[in-house]
Image (cartoon, grey):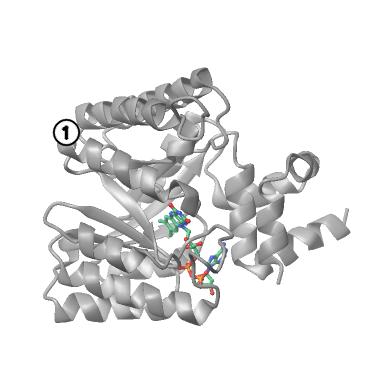
Amino acid sequence: MLRTPLLAAARSPRARTLVEQFPPTRAMVRRFVAGDYLDQAVSVTAELVGSGRRISLDHLGEDTVDAAQAAATAAAYEELLGALAETGLAGSAEVSVKLSAVGQSLARDGEKVALDNARRICEAAAAAGTTVTLDMEDHTTTDSTLAVARELRADFPWLGVVLQAYLHRTEADCADLATAGSRVRLCKGAYQEPASVAYQAKAEVDRAYARCLRTLMRGDGYPMVASHDPRLIRIAGQLAEWTGRKPESFEYQMLYGIRPEEQQRLVDTGATLRVYLPYGAEWYGYFMRRLAERPANLAFFLRALATR
Ligand code: FAD
């Protein structure tokens, strides 16, 4: 019930000003975000890598309004990748990129600007000795993101891409992408989507996720199981067993700050577990999507508001 207004607020400049200026927001944001700055991201990465986790770092930024801002985001990723190489963390940490942050939504040549910037980031990742995964945003961007991924994979075959199980199209996309060398991160999907393109009921989304996962696990690619859902994590383990996959031929992925004990439990079983770790000052949209996923997060936030 609260998901719709929270996801609408994620796109509202007025709500953004209110939430950003509310002092207790900061403490709550730190549960999900490493910090505003690169050195904070590197230090949290080092700590998590020390506990056996792998990392995918996201330099937060969406709603890029001009080409200069898009280029600045690409430069921030280059700096991040340089820092990962310098600190010896590139073997355990990759980066995740939202194409909207590097220009996809610009009215003029958006897809081309995003492709060029994403290419810069892939080149920096190759130099650092790590990989890149393209995040997936709302359904109006899916075709464009997959087209950019196809183009980049010609030069960077290790490039990963996210698919969202809630979209009706995703089972077919999984079948297309379950090929040798491809890395697919399967998530449920975090945006407000119409019934014409996406399953609406949780049970339907969960069933679609399990079907997509079966396709990926049976295929020849490298599945990345991005979910905190205990049932789907169990199903992933069973599918891996039935398809003869070893721990290094697929991985679990979870968001920073969510179910950390389960993350450690998976690491302790010998599974590969990667944490998606965002950092940067543009945390608003990311933070609101996390609130929308779980009413308890919102209750915590509202309690802080009430006790002020
Ligand atoms: P849910 O059914 O939502 O949650 C299962 C359980 O996990 C909950 O009962 C709760 O215990 C816990 N949990 C889930 N979310 C939260 C939360 N916010 N706070 C506290 N506990 C929580 N979505 C996209 O649309 N595009 C992307 O590119 C994308 N990338 C992602 C990358 C990673 C590594 C992960 C893990 C998720 C990504 N997502 C992305 C988000 C995803 O689509 C879901 O919105 C999110 O993961 C919640 O779904 P769930 O599978 O965890 O299942």
Q: Which residue is mark 1?
A: 155
Name the spot of residue 15 as percent of width and height, x first: 77, 46
For this rendering, which residue is in front, 31 or 110? 110
At horizontal 55% and vertical 73% (from top left) the residue drawn is 200
x, y percent for residue 55? 35, 48
Q: Dot 1 lies on which element?
A: helix
The reply to whether residue 134 is visible in this rendering is no
Is residue 163 depicted above or below 135 in this figure? below
Displayed quadrant of residue 152:
top left
Dot 1 crowding, Cα within 10 Å, few <14, some 14–19, many 20+: few
Q: Is residue 8 visible?
A: yes
Counting every numbered tag in the picture gives: 1
* Image position of 145 (left or right of 301): left
Q: Nearer the viewer, residue 298 or 194?
A: 194
Amino acid, disc 1: Asp
Q: x%, y% of residue 229? A: 45, 74
Q: Is residue 5 left or right of residue 262?
A: right
Residue sitting farthest toward the top: 68
Residue 36's place in the image compared with 304, above or below, is above
x and y, in percent, of residue 35 in the image: 56, 38
Residue at image position (20%, 34%) is 129
The quadrant in which the N terminus is found is bottom right
Please name the residue shown 52% across and 59% down the image.
190
Q: Is 260 on the left-hand or right-hand side of 133? A: right
From this view, report whether residue 191 is shown above or below residue 81: below
User: Residue 158 versus residue 252: which sits nearer the camera?
Assistant: 158
